[in-house]
Image: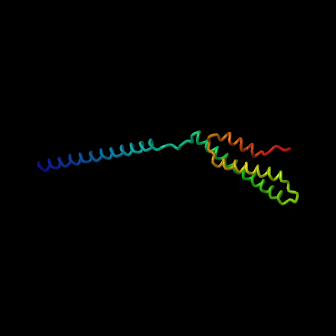
């Protein structure tokens, strides 16, 4: 009888151990599922650019374009000055006007380089006006 009781006890113990092991595995699966759900909820979505960031990017692009136009115009003035100074009939008034225009455009280029989004529209309009040049006589 002791043997049957011992075998019965061992069987119950094995059954309890199996049930405990199964419960732990189920518990681990729940934890893994919870962890995956939680991490999916925590991961940030791709940031959407704010309207201010779009405006800043637009201003920076416009600055680069305007700076390029200024540099191109300054190079053209330098070329004109070189030709006028080599000319035997150099026109001092024309040279002086070109030098003044070049100085204005160089000052505009410095302002554009240091500008930020504050007051950009007004600054851009002023520089574009300067780029148009003096009115033709």
Q: Position of residue 81 (x, y in %)?
A: 80, 56
Residue 90 x/y as whole percent:
85, 56
Rendered image coloring scheme: rainbow
Identity of the residue drawn at 46% across and 44% down:
43
In the picture, residue 117 is in which quadrant? top right
Q: Residue visible at 64% across and 40% down?
A: 119
Q: Residue at x 81, y 53 (%)?
A: 95
Q: Is residue 69 among what the camera can see? A: no
Pinpoint residue 137: horizontal percent, then vertical percent.
86, 44
Left or right: 51 in relation to 67? left
* Image side of residue 49 versus residue 83, left or right: left
- In-image side of 11 versus 100 (left or right): left
Q: Residue 128 occupies which quadrant of the picture?
A: top right
Name, please, the residue furthest toward the left. 1
Seen at 17% across and 49% down, the residue is: 7
Q: Residue furthest right?
A: 89
User: In this rendering, does residue 9 appear at all?
Assistant: yes
* Numbered circles on residues, count: 0
Q: Nearer the viewer, residue 120 or 111?
A: 111
Q: Nearer the viewer, residue 121 or 86?
A: 86
């Amino acid at each position: 009888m002791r043997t049957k009781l011992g075998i019965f006890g061992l069987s119950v113990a094995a059954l309890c151990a199996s049930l405990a092991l199964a419960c732990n595995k189920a518990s681990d699966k729940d934890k893994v599922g919870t962890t995956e759900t939680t991490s999916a909820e925590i991961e940030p979505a791709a940031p959407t650019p704010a309207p201010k960031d779009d405006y800043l990017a637009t201003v920076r692009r416009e600055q680069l374009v305007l700076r390029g136009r200024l540099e191109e115009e300054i190079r053209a003035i330098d070329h004109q000055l070189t030709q006028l100074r080599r000319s035997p009939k150099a026109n001092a008034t024309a040279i002086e006007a070109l030098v003044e225009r070049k100085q204005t455009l160089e000052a505009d280029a410095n302002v554009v380089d240091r500008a930020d989004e504050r007051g950009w529209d007004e600054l851009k309009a002023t520089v574009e006006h300067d780029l148009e040049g003096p009115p033709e006589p």
